[in-house]
Image (cartoon, rainbow, N blue to C red):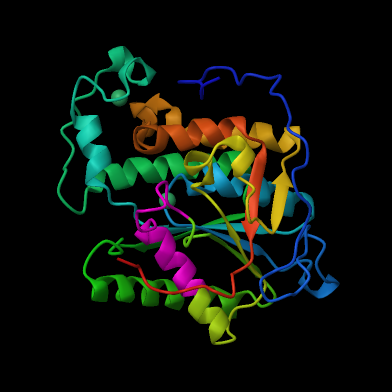
């Protein structure tokens, strides 16, 4: 089954997998709350704030958790952390034939868009953000917040550190603005498709920011969803080490699939160019077909820094 193109009907009849694991313990030995929506009454109306490092991460690995929190009566805010500058995606979309072959949703699988490939890749930032907005709408989030941070995570070591500090500053602002909020990041220390490769630097910078704020005592009630697991592991391995596996109800899965579809919709009149699908087609496909999300507490062995 593949992610439908254009406005194709969403297939039904997906086989559901059984529950693979129950809530475990965090590395710190604190009981992990399997249903974060069932928080204290004081926090009941405080928002759950989800941080998507790039346009697409929310659809791939946060959507089910977003919907879980909404169903529990929590306001949900969705943050886009980086602008998502990406010359690689532009190269794909500037060239024909497409690397995706007949899986490409462009008419005739052809696209020679002539977009700027050099930093800061304005057209792809704009198109990716249009997909993100459509995804956020499909998920029904209460507020979208765009940090608009230039993604310097792949620059020099000091540019990486500066990026982490910028994220910290923005998150700190939300902590002060929304007391009692819970904060949901991506599990940057896990987000790679090859165990021998360093992690996705943008994702790692986001979890580093959470790490430092937690260490300072500024941030509490933090969880991390593993995004790259859908590509890095086969189905029976994806739950390994997770503190909580969310089994997404089918009504929520329909919305998650609609969010994923935003990243495979070709409609230039709406500034939609399937940039997500030209970036991470495998992850979108796998997440589309796996009604689970994988939630972690910060491990006690966590090491900040981009790594080599
Ligand atoms: Zn990402
Ligand atoms: Zn294409």
Picture coordinates of residue 305, whole percent (x, y): 38, 73
Magenta span: 191-210
> In which quadrant will I find the C terminus?
bottom left
Picture coordinates of residue 36, whole percent (x, y): 75, 61
Looking at the rendering, the quadrant in which ligand 2 lies is top left
Residue at position x 18%, y 53% in the image: 119
Residue 25 vs residue 262: left or right? Answer: right
From this view, report whether residue 140 is shown above or below residue 282. Answer: below
Residue at position x 27%, y 61% in the image: 154
Residue 124 vs residue 191: left or right? Answer: left
* Residue 18 or residue 39, whichever sits in front: 18
Picture coordinates of residue 188, whole percent (x, y): 47, 60
The answer to whether residue 170 is visible is no
In the displayed image of the protein, which residue is found farthest to the bottom? Answer: 216
Picture coordinates of residue 281, whole percent (x, y): 42, 32
In the displayed image of the protein, which residue is found farthest to the right? Answer: 41
* Residue 48 or residue 153, whichever sits in front: 153
Q: Is residue 275 magenta?
A: no
* Residue 18 or residue 100, whichever sits in front: 18
Residue 57 vs residue 129: left or right? Answer: right
Count every numbered label the image shows and give the total.
0
């Amino acid at each position: 089954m593949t992610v439908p193109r254009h406005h194709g009907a969403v297939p039904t009849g997906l086989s559901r997998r059984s529950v693979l694991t129950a809530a475990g313990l965090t590395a710190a030995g604190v009981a992990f709350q399997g249903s974060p929506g069932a928080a204290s009454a004081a926090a009941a109306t405080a928002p759950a704030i989800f941080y998507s490092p790039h346009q697409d991460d929310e659809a791939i690995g946060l959507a089910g958790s977003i919907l879980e929190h909404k169903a529990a009566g929590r306001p949900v805010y969705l943050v886009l952390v980086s602008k998502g500058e990406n010359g690689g995606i532009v190269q794909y979309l500037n060239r024909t034939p497409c690397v995706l072959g007949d899986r490409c949703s462009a008419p005739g699988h052809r696209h020679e868009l002539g977009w700027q490939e050099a930093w800061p890749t304005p057209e792809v930032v704009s198109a990716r953000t249009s997909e993100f907005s459509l995804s956020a709408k499909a998920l029904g989030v209460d507020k979208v917040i765009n940090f608009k941070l230039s993604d310097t995570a792949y620059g020099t070591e000091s540019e990486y550190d500066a990026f982490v500090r910028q994220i910290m500053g923005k998150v700190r602002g939300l902590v002060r603005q929304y007391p009692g909020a819970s904060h949901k990041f991506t599990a940057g220390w896990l987000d790679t498709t090859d165990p021998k490769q360093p992690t996705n630097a943008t994702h790692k910078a986001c979890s580093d920011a959470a790490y430092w704020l937690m260490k300072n005592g500024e941030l509490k009630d933090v969880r991390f969803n593993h995004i790259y697991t859908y590509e890095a592991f086969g189905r029976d391995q994806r739950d390994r080490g997770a503190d909580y596996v969310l089994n997404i109800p089918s009504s929520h899965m329909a919305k998650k699939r609609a969010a994923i579809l935003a990243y495979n919709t070709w409609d230039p009149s709406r500034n939609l160019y399937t940039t997500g699908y030209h970036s991470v087609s495998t992850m979108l496909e796998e997440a589309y077909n796996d009604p689970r999300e994988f939630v972690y507490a910060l491990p006690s062995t966590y090491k900040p820094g981009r790594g080599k």
